[in-house]
Image: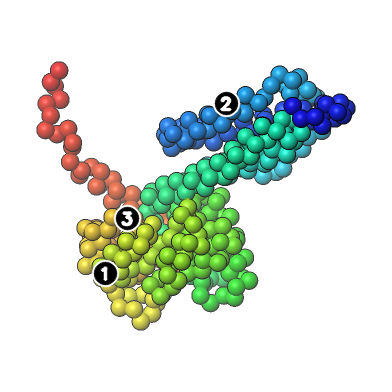
Amino acid sequence: MGNSAHSQPFMQPALYRILDANLDRAREGLRVIEEWCRFGLEDVALTAQCKHWRQELAHWHQAELRAARNTPDDPGTDLTHPQEAIRSSVEQVLQANFARVEEALRVLEEYGKVYRSEMAIAVKQMRYQVYTLESHLLSIQRRQLLQSARLYLVTSPSDNLIAAVESALQGGVTLVQYRDKETDDSARFRNAQRLRQLCREYDALFIVNDRVDLALAVDADGVHLGQEDMPFEWARRMLGQDKIIGRSTHSAEELERAISEGADYVGVGPVYETPTKAGRPAAGLEYVRYAAEHCSIPWYAIGGIDTQNIYQVLDAGAERISVVRAIMQSDQPVFATQFFVAQLDQKRRSQTHSAPDPWGNLDHTAS
């Protein structure tokens, strides 16, 4: 045991209470994370890793530390923050508890140097491992949301940008891209911050168009790159492996290249000519049919899709669509979003019902 605490006995109760409180805090936070790994992700390895960390901390949680606990006289028990009472998504729960664990481990590392140097070394190593798990787990969350996202809203400049996006989120959109090539950077930053917060509140992904720097500044879930934007490899280096990178494609060649680059999803279009991409000829429904047969990653049909032509796009094989004006310029964006979500859900249900029965050739009555 460190000599400092013994050479100054009057310090020992406070030191022990600090260690006891932060061991409790770290173990509790790890348990919250562990439960998601177990029941949310059903990942045996991640669950075992969290359990191992909890057991390692329990090893250091000796009786002498527990005996110093004095909860009734602890001034910190009455301290709270309004945000602690609100968690609007699993992502927020995980982020809050990762922060809790990492802060507690840092405290244990520093005061552990006075208590037992070997404990300080152990929790320091654990803290870096928890950082790695946090990045990995949030990456899994993002990609699960991406797999399930059928409707992708791409914004356009608007006086009621925030209200329109929130209405779309209320209507069921779970993937939002902030696209604005007109506004100055300070306004873009403010808009991106607010949209990022809204998407967190509604458990939706938030993507920034073109601007890797802006995506990093507001901690967006990723970035969407056009064919003339920053090279994919540089965007990946800057964003890291845990963020999502999407790519616009307009031909079979661009689609194959995006997949080989490692894009997480692609846009397929423009299906119809659209003022959003003025001057670009429509790729048409043939390209949608090609993507339906050849694309191995999530893809979104995009370009001029509205409430009238969506049926043609779905019939061509699209399972996911991206919409701009049909929601952003709608008088009732909630209902417009719900309409698109309903059509996509119906398409998914029809595919499920028409899928072949893997047990169809077996005699179900056989014993």
* Residue designated by label 1: 253
Residue 97 x %, y %: 60, 39
Give the mark nearer the N terminus: 1 vs 2. 2
Instruction: Say how the picture is coloured.
Output: rainbow
Quarter the C terminus occupies: top left
Identity, as a three-letter code, of the amino acid under mark 1: Glu
Residue 236 x %, y %: 45, 61
Quick check: 289 above or below 9?
below
Q: Would you say 356 lies left or right of 349 here?
A: left
Point 41% across, 47% down: residue: 144
Q: Would you say 32 lies left or right of 229 here?
A: right
Residue furthest front as drawn: 3
- Calculate the distance from the C-alpha at mark 3 to the C-alpha at mark 2: 39 Å
The reply to whether dot 3 and dot 2 touch (C-beta < 8 Å) is no
Quarter the N terminus occupies: top right
- Calculate the distance from the C-alpha at mark 1 to the C-alpha at mark 3: 15 Å
Dot 1 alpha-carbon crowd within 10 angstroms: few under 14, some 14 to 19, many 20 or more: few
Q: Would you say 143 lies left or right of 11 here?
A: left
Point 65% across, 36% down: residue: 121
The reply to whether dot 1 and dot 3 touch (C-beta < 8 Å) is no
| Label number found at residue 331 | none
Identity, as a three-letter code, of the amino acid under mark 3: Ile
Is label 3 or label 2 in front? 2
Give the mark nearer the N terminus: 3 vs 2. 2
Q: Nearer the viewer, residue 162 or 266?
A: 266
Identity, as a three-letter code, of the amino acid under mark 2: Gln
* Residue designated by label 2: 55
Give the mark nearer the N terminus: 1 vs 3. 1
Image quarter of residue 308: bottom left
| Label number found at residue 297 | 3
Point 58% across, 34% down: residue: 30
- Calculate the distance from the C-alpha at mark 1 to the C-alpha at mark 2: 52 Å
